[in-house]
Amino acid sequence: MCGIVGYIGTQQAAPLLLEGLARLEHRGYDSAGLAVLGSGLRVAKKAGRVRDLGADLPKRFTGKAGIGHTRWATHGPANDVNAHPHVDAKGDVAVVHNGIIDNAATLRQQLTDDGVDLASDTDTEVLAHLVARSTADTLEERVAEALAAIEGTYGIAVLHADFPDRIVVARNGSPLIIGVGDKEMHVASDLGALVRYTTTVAHLDDGEMATLTATGFTTYRQDLTRIAREATEVDVDPSSYDAGEHDSFMRKEMLEQPSAAERVLRGRLDERFGTGHLGGLDMDARETRAIKRVKILGCGSAYYVGQMGASLVEELARIPADAEAASEFRYRNPVIEPDTLYVAVSQSGETIDTLLAVQEIRRKGGRVIGLVNVVGSAIARECDGGIYLHAGPEVAVASTKALTNMFLGFALLALQLGRVRDLSIADGKRLIAGLSRLPEQIQEVLDGEDALADLATDLADAESLFFVGRVRGFPVAREGAQKFKEISYRHAEAYQTSELKHGPLALISPEVPTIAIVPADELTDRNVGALHEIAARGGPLVVVTHADVDLGEVPCRRIDVPRNERELDPILLTIPLQLLAFHAAQVLGHDIDKPRNLAKSVTVE
Ligand code: F6R
């Protein structure tokens, strides 16, 4: 959430920073800004997209050191003034910031009482004034002094006209990665902004600061004691951060699902013993057997796929399991049990609510593993072990391929937990065979895109829709509704099919379509009964089902997906819902990768 870039070296900073910001724009896109240090400090910032900022840069906006920011508003509306960088009254200090300063109101009041005119509504601006007011000898000391007054989370980068040879950065809760180039240094909140220039990087940890000069970097704690931090090579293909021939990242990422699924399964299917092989869990059979409960924590789509994961664990391992929104978890003072396995699930590995839940569990002595896509991310590092999802970079705000790989990660985990308990080798092998078939079957669903696009065109007209499912199908419905509302901005509500007649049936009408998840399983007949009830009230129906399900005389449009093992069906039922949401959003002319009000990686509470 919000993107930071910084550069210091031998080239003009502004074009490099603009390019970096364009790559980070999915992290926040309501305004953007740059500061460069040349003959003095110059700032340009603007509400709107990075391209608007680039088109409007003042003439001779030159300097070989600079910082940039793309914003997702927290304090104050998205306008030119509230855009970052923020500067002090004299215009000597420029600061960009991700995160939230919790005591900003108090600090703003103190500054105002001291006669400082605050230009913006933001929390960040106080930092610029605090750095400017410090009289310490070095920029590092001034920044550390300012940070000592601050409560909250931050990733920051600071430029100061009196210290033109350096950028000082600091991290507490919002990621910062330093990139080492040839006589130049970069910094960014996300690897994607760096990989075009360098793949030699160093991650900062919380509570750490760094100074970047054209020739290198030094790292230290906030008390300014030095710490050694080596830069290392990351194995990443820079082109995986490009949309290539696709007109959106979401479409690219949906189409990548078969290959992403193959990657998460590779080397993890033990066909001989019919189990999963997850080295990263770091638990022997005795420890695995001792687990009495599984609790899954994630936010948004990661929470919904966590519900699918909980079903898998209960069905395959017969261990009580549930999923909870990580954003609520720590606020109810949860009881942490020593024989519960906690599982944090996150694409970015940065979602602050999930990270704080992990920290709460660990503080109370619980064991928590991560299902995380971004290698080396905060959640991955905080957990006691885990499963990397290998989905590759996910740029579109709407999560697709990462979500699919989360499901597969849960299936592997459930298999491994099941096979040290009562899941038979025959069932284990049945599921391994099912998992091996999945990438091809996902491709089959994707191949049906044209028909789904037609259907989406009709659904796009509806102001309000229901997504319904039961048991395994309910999280599918929740995820389908999530995708639909997120990018089409239509009201989409998920419900258990069984609950419709307890209230929401009152809303069913010819104007309110229902997308029903009706797999071939033990609940098919009951689900078909509910379809009749919806049809009888004139509700248009789209049914996501299997070819051998007999829907009788129910008037509906059906989407048949390939059958796998029933436990694994939910992911195949989910894929068409991604395509429906995508095409509805496209028909409505929305910016698919950057839906309004949202941003990728929610790093503020
Ligand atoms: C929905 C979506 C969000 C994320 C959620 C968690 O398409 O992308 O709901 O799933 O913000 O993000 P991660 O997985 O990065 O923790």
Image (spheres, grey):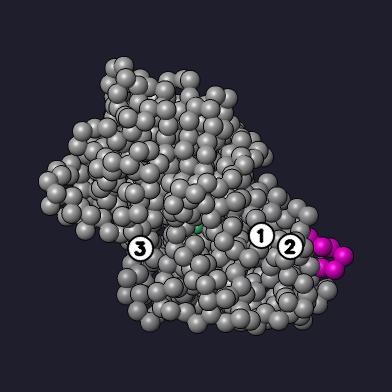
Answer with mark 1 or mark 3, whichever residue precedes in sequence: 1
Q: Which residues are magenta?
A: 269-274
The residue singled out by tag 1 in the image is: 387
Residue 491 is one of the magenta-drawn residues? no
10 Å neighbourhood of mark 2: few (<14), some, or many (≥20)? many
Labels 2 and 1 touching (C-beta < 8 A):
yes
Answer with mark 3 or mark 2, whichever residue precedes in sequence: 2
Q: Secondary structure at mark 2?
A: loop
Please provide percent x and percent y for residue 319. 65, 81
Disc 1/disc 3 C-alpha distance (Å): 40 Å
- Secondary structure mostly seen in magenta is loop
Please provide percent x and percent y for residue 364. 53, 76
Answer with mark 2 or mark 1, whichever residue precedes in sequence: 2
In this rendering, position of residue 432 left or right of residue 60: right
Please provide percent x and percent y for residue 356. 46, 65
Q: Amino acid at mark 3?
A: Val
Which of discs 1 and 3 lies nearer the camera? The answer is 1
Residue 271 is one of the magenta-drawn residues? yes
- Residue at 58% of width from left, 75% of height from top? 366
